[in-house]
Image (cartoon, rainbow, N blue to C red):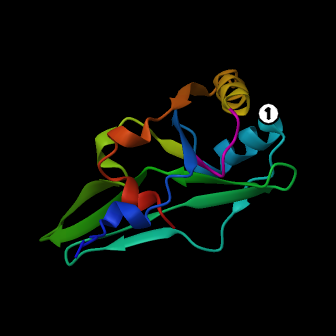
């Protein structure tokens, strides 16, 4: 009798493309510039990606856009969350910042664009080129999914 075992990878949806973006812009400003330069309509999602541990919690902003023509769903996702904690000790106010990353192995990436579906290589190439032409963006590029250890955080 042959036994078939399932791995967690069997349930993951690797049918998406991931683009990393390096910029110091806030999420709403980046969404605005992408809408102007890519002819997209990113809008703030009704949800965010929330992660909670016993000692901290993180909430990553999400913007989404549906391309009806090609049947692709696009998501603009923040890669970092900064939590500021203040402690009052005597009369001195101390504050500490804790930064949490959605994809820790890509700490230098500020935002990701996740494109669900199977966009052609030409669409991906054009998208990355248009993003790189925006003055406030340092660089953008496609991210190799096979190299990500934390890609399960992008399944939502």
Residue drawn 28% across the image and 55% down it: 97
Q: Nearer the viewer, residue 63 or 82?
A: 63
Image quadrant in which you'd find residue 87: bottom left
Q: How many marks?
A: 1
Is 58 placed left or right of 36 in the picture? left
Q: In which quadrant of the rendered image does the N terminus lie?
A: bottom left
Residue 26 rendering spot, x and y as whole percentages: 57, 46
Q: Is residue 34 on the magenta stretch?
A: no
Q: Kindly state the secondary structure of the residue where label 1 is placed.
A: helix
Q: Is residue 142 above or below residue 42?
A: above
Task: Spot the residue most to the right.
Answer: 69
Q: Nearer the viewer, residue 6 or 98?
A: 6
Q: Residue at x 29, y 48 (%)?
A: 149
Which residue lies under the disc numbered 1? 37
Spot the residue most to the front: 1
Magenta region, residue range = 114-120
Horizontal and vertical percent position of residue 52: 31, 75
């Amino acid at each position: 009798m042959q036994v078939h075992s399932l791995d967690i990878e069997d349930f993951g949806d690797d049918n998406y493309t991931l683009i990393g973006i390096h910029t110091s812009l806030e999420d709403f400003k980046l969404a605005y510039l992408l809408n102007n330069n890519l002819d997209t309509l990113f809008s703030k999602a009704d949800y965010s990606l929330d992660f909670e541990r016993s000692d901290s919690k993180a909430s990553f902003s999400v913007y989404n856009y549906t391309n009806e023509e090609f049947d692709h769903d696009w998501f603009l996702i923040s890669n970092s969350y900064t939590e500021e904690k203040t402690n009052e000790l005597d009369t001195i106010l101390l504050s500490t910042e804790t930064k949490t990353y959605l994809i820790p192995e890509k700490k230098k990436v500020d935002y990701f664009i996740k494109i669900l579906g199977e966009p052609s290589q030409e669409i991906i190439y054009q998208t990355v080129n248009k993003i790189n032409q925006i003055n406030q963006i340092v660089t953008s590029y496609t991210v190799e999914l096979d190299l990500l250890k934390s890609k399960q955080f992008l399944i939502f």
